[in-house]
Amino acid sequence: QVQLVESGGGLVQRGGSLRLSCAASGTIFRIDPMGWFRQGPGTQRDLVATVESDGTTNVADSVKGRVTISRDNEKNTVTLQMNSLKPEDTAVYYCYAAILDWSHRVRDYWGQGTQVTVSS
């Protein structure tokens, strides 16, 4: 089985910073891509940023310049550093990974979600 476990998140004031981390465990042959999505109240789940195993990143325009995504391919971890946070960044943040797993198929996996709240 494969599991994504997130850490980080919490309450921060406008202009503050937060760091989210996610670790994938289980029978994993390859992860591409790995990253973060978010879902605010009454909204759909949207891309924040993803990173490929070769380091190629895809970052949403809404957070570009304010977030840095990185991964450790050996440890199967991904980290999202968020700076200059705004109240509109408030959402549940979900770790995402497309994983070639024990079934020898690529499956989408999601973490349980971690709340990020930015106060004004």
Image (spheres, helix red, strand yellow):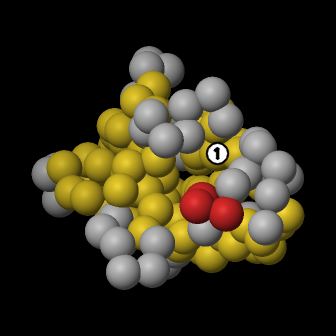
Q: Quadrant of the N terminus?
A: bottom left
Left or right relative to 76: residue 65: right
Q: Label 1 belongs to which residue?
A: 80
Horizontal and vertical percent for residue 22?
A: 60, 57
The structure residue drawn at horizontal position 43% and vertical position 38%, both measured from the top left corner, is 60
The quarter of the rendered structure image containing the C terminus is bottom right
Question: Image height check: is 7 above or below 21?
Answer: below
Total labels drawn? 1
Q: Where in the figure is residue 107, as x and y percent of width and height?
A: 21, 57
Q: Please rate how many residues cluster around mark 1, counting C-alpha atoms within 10 Å: few if below 14, some from 14 to 19, many from 20.
A: many
Image quadrant assignment for residue 87? bottom right
Residue at the extreme front of the image, as rendered: 120
* Residue displayed at 77% across by 44% down: 84
> Which sits in the foreground, 57 or 119?
119
Q: Is residue 34 above or below residue 96?
A: above
Amino acid identity at mark 1: Leu
Examine the rendering and report whether any part of residue 59 can be seen.
yes
Work out whether residue 74 can be spotted.
no
Towards the viewer: 38 or 88: 88
Where does residue 108 sit, x and y in percent of width and height?
26, 58
Q: Residue at x 85, y 52 (%)?
A: 16
Tell me where residue 32 sits by quadrant. Answer: top left
Does dot 1 land on a helix, a strand or a loop? strand
Q: Position of residue 8 (x, y in %)?
A: 74, 65
